[in-house]
Image (cartoon, rainbow, N blue to C red):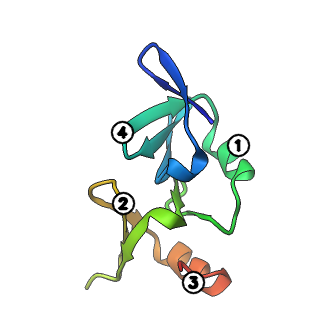
């Protein structure tokens, strides 16, 4: 895929992306090198990705299962996912977490 970084446009292998997040008119692609925007709606990007390798967590985020470091349930019943190398956690709704586990599992 082609992603912008300032005035530069670079090709980034999809496998290098830990997640994609919707952002107004573009989609942010997160890799070990940082974030880069692509001119494609998240829905379009999801249609081009292998459903065995990615999972949509909150409606505005797609995660690459190969980059999932951990998934756990907290005391409030929330299911945050931690991605490598991205710092922090991404929230996953209980309904999506349950559906993903039933369908194909998180791996």
Q: Residue at x 53, y 60 (%)?
A: 64
Residue to which mark 2 is pinned: 84
Q: Helix, strand, or loop for circle 1?
A: helix
Check the picture and name the quadrant holding the N terminus.
top right
Disc marking residue 18: none
Taking the view exactly as shown, the residue that stands out farthest to the right is 47
Q: Residue at x 47, y 77 (%)?
A: 94
Q: Residue at x 51, y 59 (%)?
A: 63
Q: Helix, strand, or loop for circle 2?
A: loop
Dot 2 or dot 4, earlier in sequence = 4
- The CA span between labels 1 and 2 is 24 Å
- Give above or below for 52 relative to 38: below
- The CA span between labels 4 and 3 is 29 Å
Residue to which mark 3 is pinned: 101
For residue 105, say whether it is visible. Answer: yes
Disc marking residue 34: 4
Dot 4 or dot 3, earlier in sequence = 4
**Count of picture labels:** 4
Disc marking residue 44: 1
Q: Helix, strand, or loop for circle 4?
A: strand
Dot 1 or dot 3, earlier in sequence = 1
């Amino acid at each position: 895929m082609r992603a912008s970084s300032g005035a530069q446009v670079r090709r980034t292998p999809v496998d290098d992306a830990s997640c994609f997040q919707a952002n107004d008119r573009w989609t942010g692609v997160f890799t070990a090198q940082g974030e880069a925007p692509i001119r494609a709606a998240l829905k379009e990007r999801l249609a081009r990705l292998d459903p065995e390798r990615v999972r949509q967590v909150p409606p505005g985020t797609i995660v690459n299962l190969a980059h999932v470091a951990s998934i756990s349930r907290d005391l409030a019943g929330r299911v945050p996912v931690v991605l490598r190398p991205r710092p922090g956690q991404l929230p996953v709704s209980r309904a999506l977490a349950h559906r993903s586990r039933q369908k194909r599992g998180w791996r």
